[in-house]
Amino acid sequence: MAKYPKLYNISNQQYQLISSVGSQKDAGWEWSFSWRRSLFENEIGMAAEFLEELAQVKIQQNQPDLWVWKADPSGNYSTKSAYRLLMEATTGAVEDRTFVELWNLKIPLKAIVFTWRLIKDRLPTRTNLRTRQVELNDSRCPLCNSPDEDATHLFFYCTKTLPLWWESQSWINSSGVFPHNPKDHFLQHDNRSAVGARARRWKCWWVALTWTIWKHRNRVVFDNQSFDGSKVMDDAPFLLWSWLKVMEKGFTMHFSYWSSHLKAAF
């Protein structure tokens, strides 16, 4: 209720016990939620996050509730484990290299958060929503209507989006097979002939293109628009240029020059 007040306000199951909003199945506990109306666009993502959190909770019907300290394998709190947890958070000792690279990019925070969600496969794609028991009439890719819409297909292998990566790879004379998951795709999206700012721009381009694809995908889903790859390739360079203009020191390139000399930019 406190963390997801919007979802709570439209729930038909306020003040009910856990046993009333789910049941034990052969595969484990299965939640069954009921809403007063269909979820709006911003609420779908919220519901997906809510269900993702619930997926981490193990329902044990025949055992009493108890507190568990997850920072120690024993489940018991200790000063040593708390100290280790704080040190890891401070020094980043266990931080994935993917996110070190991501957080070092000079792009807006909301773009970093979007990329983090994509790499962790937490965007509300139709496959993820179905996994989290959000009712959908159709789980196919809204761009090509063929396989189920998961992040790998939508952003990298859909017949509507794959050519966008081929086009941008031609700017740096690069070719080859793309990695299969978003994390590896991001890590291996390198311009090995560039250093410094130009190398970082290529990583930023990955973020700009995936975010633009997502925004255009949402227009298809929620506004009944058609997907236009050429429009994506107009919008994504402008988005990246707007980031660099504000956040990259010494960047003074006019957009008309930038957009017509993309090969030189990277």
Image (cartoon, helix red, strand yellow):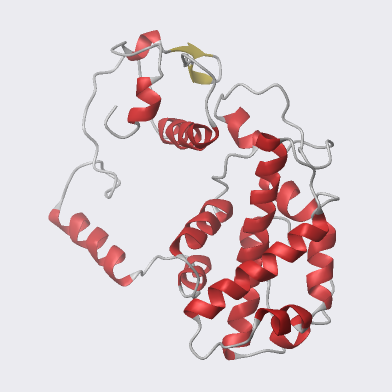
* Residue occupying image coordinates x 54% and y 29%: 132
Residue appearing at x 32%, y 14% in the figure? 14
Looking at the image, residue 222 lies above or below residue 25: below
For this rendering, which residue is in front, 157 or 61?
157
Residue 127 at x, y percent in the picture? 66, 35
- Residue 266 in sight here: no
User: Most extreme residue toward the top, as rendered?
Assistant: 20
Q: Nearer the viewer, residue 106 or 219?
A: 219
Image x and y of residue 50, in percent: 43, 33
Count the labels in the image.
0
70 lies above or below 136: below
In screen coordinates, is 212 left or right of 176? Answer: left
Quadrant in the picture for the N terminus:
top left
Image coords of residue 168 (percent x, y): 78, 71
Q: Quadrant of residue 150?
A: top right
Please give the name of the residue rendered at 72% of the width and 80% of the height, measured from the top-left corner.
256
Residue 81 sits in which quadrant?
Answer: bottom left
